Image (tube, rainbow, N blue to C red):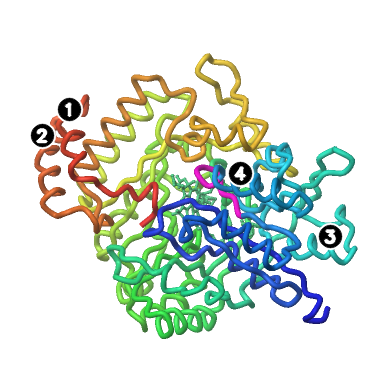
Amino acid sequence: MSLRTRRHILLVNPTITQRRSARFPLAILNLAAALAERYETTLVDGNVDPDFISTALKTIETTSTAAVGVSVMGGPQLRTAIALSRAVRSRFPGIPIIWGGHFPTLCADACLAMPYVDYAVRGQGEETLLELLDALFEGAPPPERIAGLTWRREGAVLHNGRRAFSAASHARSLPYERLGDPRRYLTRTYLGRRTSGYQAALGCRFRCTFCGVAAMFRGGTALPPAPRLQRDLDYLTGRLGVDSLLFYDNNFFDREADTVPLLEVLAKRGLPWWCFARADALVGLSASSWSLVRRSGLRMTYIGAESPSDWLLHDARKGTRADQTVEAVERCRANGVIPELSFMLAPPQDPDGETERTFEYIRHIKRIHPAAEIMLYVYAPLPPAAGSRDPHVERVVSRLRDGAGAPLVFPATAEEWAQPHWLAYWCHTDTPWLTPRLRQRIRDFTTVLGCRFPTVTDVRSPWWGKSALRTLASWRYRYRRYRGPWELEATRRFVRLWDPRVAGL
Ligand code: B12
Ligand code: SF4
């Protein structure tokens, strides 16, 4: 295709967080890199542009945009994606609107139930989007041959077969400069003054039933070659001045032999960094790798601890055990790393009992490593992905009940998913089977724990405020008097603590 005839595609990351915690919108950057040979693209990011809908509409007008791609994660981004798509459809009714990302991957039917979504791309989006644009504008391939696509034919919604895992994006560089000044995305965190998000490895080998990553990659994973990491770090540190990194790899420590070359690259730089890791992988690391970890500057690692109960870990297909979590915490302490542990409270099988057991387990962990960070979520399994079957996930979901004890029915449309109670479900902050008493109990424990151990990731609240809250909360924590911490709530109105569950680090 000659340069003159290249069509223009608008790629949008609708607002999900406030500007000061915006990170590189990796999804649309990766898509732009994949389209670069055949299409022109404009990137619009609602996390840095408060008027992103007006910007998108203006872009469509001035560039004769041929199609709009929208990145959609369930939760708050669903609302901004809906607002954008409605606005585009009403001003430019003929332009195809394509949704991709974690929400369409799981809920493609709910997306296509909206008149302003023409296509839903399930799973990794690069190849599917390219083929779809070629189908729309070049006449080939026929849509039914495009793996990973959900679309309409004569009013009926069709889910084409799944697309196989691809590591092709490792061969491409991200066009950061297409975002305007990429330095806008470097923010102050406890790691440094100019922290950047970055993704080295793709996918995840595991298939935990509650996790969106499992539905996206279905066990596929690929670690990047070390020279790629080196090259990207040269750009990020040399050109942009990045001084610390958040690795978004789903499991940084996947296979030790593959991880060591990456650790060696990081050890040469000594930048403070953060990553996701599994307890079993950390426990299995050799002494020489831990020594590399120390030299590399790993400050904190996010571990999906999930539960103190091995039956639940097994049921959720997690593949780790509660004793491994404790051992991983000990290894982290010995090596100067802060473990950031996430838990899923109140599973429907025994919401009260499991929640209390988790509280006690957290206290045990805090005794071993008081600096351990704790992230509390509610166990809220998401629906099985459209267009592919996973009997294990289907079984887990079939056991869920609503508040009246009837089988839980998930929303049928994206707009229903955008209702506050379903947003809370998607964000793992509430479920229909939580009783008001248990909901309050979780809220109270979260308040007491968060005040007793303010997170080190909070670089914004004043030290005196954190110190006052810590003192005020200590007797409650010590004597397990979690109920009704009104004095902590009142003090928190003045000292607003940072919640990394909402905005990331
Ligand atoms: C960075 C990040 C964020 C950032 C925002 C990112 C942004 N878009 O601006 C922040 C920190 C704000 C955030 C918040 C949330 N996040 Co988040 N986040 C991530 C993280 C760590 C990396 C995402 C990323 O950049 N990946 C790299 C890119 C390249 O991959 P990708 O986004 O999947 O994009 C590919 C495909 O999805 C697809 N695609 C994506 N968009 C589009 C668009 C089109 C048109 C097409 C065709 C294809 C396509 O193609 C892309 C390339 O292959 C992931 C975990 C992970 N490691 O992936 C979680 C993750 C995406 N987040 C998740 C969740 C649930 C949330 C929350 C909604 C809730 C929560 N409890 O965390 C919150 C919202 C909180 C709130 N405001 O209340 C889940 C999503 C699960 C799901 N099924 O929806 C993930 C997978 C974490 C997890 N393991 O559960 N998040
Ligand atoms: S929870 Fe972690 S290990 Fe399990 S599928 Fe998700 S990313 Fe992979």
* Whether residue 162 is situated above or below residue 347 in the rendered picture: below
Give the residues drawn in magenta, as a range: 71-77
Q: Position of residue 352 (x, y in %)?
A: 37, 23
* Residue type, mark 4 in image: Ile
Query: Residue 136: which disc?
Result: 3
Residue corresponding to mark 4? 82
Type of amino acid under label 2: Trp
Reading the chain from its start, which is encountered first: label 2 or label 3? 3
Q: Residue at x 67, y 66 (%)?
A: 62
Closest to the observer: 334 or 179? 179
Name the quarter where the C terminus is drawn. bottom left
Foreground: disc 4 or disc 1:
4
> In the rendered image of this protein, does residue 141 appear above or below residue 466?
below
Which circle's residue, 4 or 1, is located before the other in the chain?
Answer: 4
Q: Nearer the viewer, mark 2 or mark 3?
A: 3
Kindly tell me whether residue 290 is visible in this rendering. Answer: no
Question: Between marks 1 and 2, how big is the CA–CA gap?
Answer: 8 Å
287 and 131: which is toward the camera:
131
Q: Amino acid at mark 3?
A: Leu
Q: Nearer the viewer, mark 4 or mark 2?
A: 4
Residue 253 x, y percent position in the rendering: 46, 64
Residue to which mark 1 is pinned = 481
Q: Amino acid at mark 1?
A: Arg
Tell whether 473 sits left or right of 274. left
Q: Secondary structure at mark 1?
A: loop
